[in-house]
Image: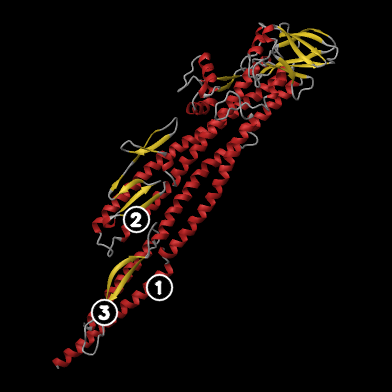
Amino acid sequence: MSLFNIGLSGLNSAAAGMSVTGQNINGMNVAGYTRKDIIQQTLYPQSAGYGYPGNGVQVTDVRRVYDGFLNKQVQTATSASNYYSSKLSYLNQLDSTLANSSTGVSSQLQTFFSAIQTLATDPNSVPSRQAMLDQASSMVNSFKAANDRIEELRSGVNTEVKSSVTQINALAKQIASLNQQISQLWQGDTQQPLDLIDQRDQAITELNKYVKASSVPSDSGKVNVFIGSGQSMVLGGTPFELQVMPGSGKDLQIGYKDGSPLPSDLLTGGSLGGALSVRKTLVQSQEELGATALGMAINFNNQQKAGLDKNGAQGTDMFTLNFNFPPWSAATPAANAALLDSYSKTFANGGMDDATRSAFESDAINALSLAITQPDKIAAASPLKATGTTGAATVSATSISRATAQDNTLADDLMAGTASLTINYTATGLSISAPAAYSGYTVVARPGVTGGYKIMSNGTPPEETGVNLTMNGTLAGGGTFQLGKNTSFTEKADNSNLLEFTNLQTANLVQGTNGSATGTMTLQGALGQTVTSVGSITNETKVMNDAQTNSLKQVTLARESVSGVNLDEETINLLKYQQAYQASGKVIQTAGTLFDTILNAVGG
């Protein structure tokens, strides 16, 4: 080849190098742009008689400086980082709501019990009675505030589900369109539409911000994209669009536009996966708070009705549980009572199944309110009274403990006045001599109460009746008394039922998942379990979020060190190609001069 052609080939190659370098400089701030480089090779040599001096060079391809492994790592780290970031944003709000030391449910519950203890020292005090009601109202409000915050967070998850599905569908369409464009320009392993491939890789990385996404090469340069645990999102040029559809209760779920739903557990990774994952914690926390509220309200109501108020009337419900809203629609007190009765039983004994129980607990705080507002309605006194006492000992206090009762028959009969017990005492203890229906019942010591006794049923095994009494004086000389309904209420300073209220603080009132009729946790224990569980999950998520954020930074830097544009390097390349272009021009100029010399010699 002539010197002119050799210079021309160098000129063209240098021009291509400057074009690619210029594109790198322009594309350095474009998200997902991958540095490009030209591939040059010498032309096929021809013999010049004295050897093979060469025929110049040519540009055979423009390639991406690209590491597929690092790009996959960036996409995976993007998915994980956004997953934990999204999850943590919800958990931080939930944790701060539940663990608040001043306005949280736990602190308000403790203050409520403190108000009861203060009133127990002076049951006649109207200010103390009002203070107890005020604290009861504050406690109810704290339950509702926590429940409202959880509702807001669950609504926030639904909003994120909607917006994420919109973004995912848009990215799926973009990837499918890019697949089509790449396929039309595809020429095999060389001369690929590199900028379009960059755009597609970036779209897949963007998709990983919302949900875990992976790609598998297909024919003609296309890729198939799968999300979550392998659900199809893009196959070639066809996107599989998602839609939002009603789910269980208040929560939205996701499915394909053909109507088939996708289980939330399959949509992992990304901000959407994080939101769907935290939904379980939100629902569980709401159910646990609801179970605590139910345990509190039901047992306080039962105990309130097992006492007499300041006017000597039997106590009425302290709290209202009104489920007159969908899906319960309990429009009457009887309907509400039937729901609460079903809740108190196991499924095997005609109670709610697990799904219904969970939904009932989730809605419980919406049904909760304070029922009494007048201080004199607090039932501080006992509904029972000992009369006709003989002997040296006396009955100083009586009460009915509804929280511990397993058989309410005796307590109900005594309160209704349909039964009155004749109880004998001797140095060896107490026994019931009449009526015959209860003569088989036993009177045993009540642990933790000086001079305290409780009556047990005649069942096998014996069960708690909830009927309690306290003896003063010596039992050695023997004696008897009648225990029945308090029909002549004069003891304004009687705090017997208030003391039973305080005992609720340490009683197991909150039901477990088995739906047993008796509780398995105290009120503070249940709240503590919820707060601890959320706090533990929050701390674990924070650690993982920090780790994944750091991991994303590291793999991004690693990818950029290979594929990113370095302005200093590109400036050097530009000068290199410029000099090569000028030198090639000089070769062409020299070839022209030599040609002119030949022409002049021949013509001269």
Q: Is residue 29 left or right of residue 106?
A: left
Q: Where on the picture, by quarter, is residue 301? A: top right
| Circle number at residue 572 | 1
Amino acid at pointer 3: Gly
Spatial CA span between label 2 and label 1: 27 Å
Question: Which element is circle 3 on?
Answer: loop
Which of the pair 32/435 is nearer the observer? 435
Q: Where is mark 2, residue-wise?
A: 199
Residue at 40% from the left image edge and 73% from the top image edge = 572
Disc 2, disc 1: CB below 8 Å?
no
Q: Residues within 10 Å of mark 3 (few under 14, many from 20)?
A: many
Amino acid at pointer 2: Gln
Question: Which element is circle 1 on?
Answer: helix
Answer whether residue 531 is visible to the viewer in this image.
yes
Question: Which element is circle 2 on?
Answer: helix
* Placement of 310 over or under 172, stated as above or below: above
Q: Is residue 583 left or right of residue 435?
A: left
The N terminus is located in which quarter?
Answer: bottom left
Spatial CA span between label 2 and label 3: 35 Å
Residue farthest left in this picture: 603
Percent x, y for residue 229?
Answer: 40, 46
The C terminus is located in which quarter?
Answer: bottom left
**Mark 2 vs mark 1: in front:** 2
* Placement of 436 over or under 58, stated as above or below: above
Which of the pair 1/337 is nearer the observer? 337
Percent x, y for residue 213?
Answer: 39, 49
Q: Where on the picture, by quarter, is residue 536? A: top right
Residue at 56% from the left image edge and 46% from the top image edge = 540
Residue at 45% from the left image edge and 45% from the top image edge = 271
* Placement of 40 over or under 118, stated as above or below: below
Q: Along the polypeptide, which appears first: circle 2 or circle 3? A: 3
Q: Where is mark 3, residue-wise?
A: 56
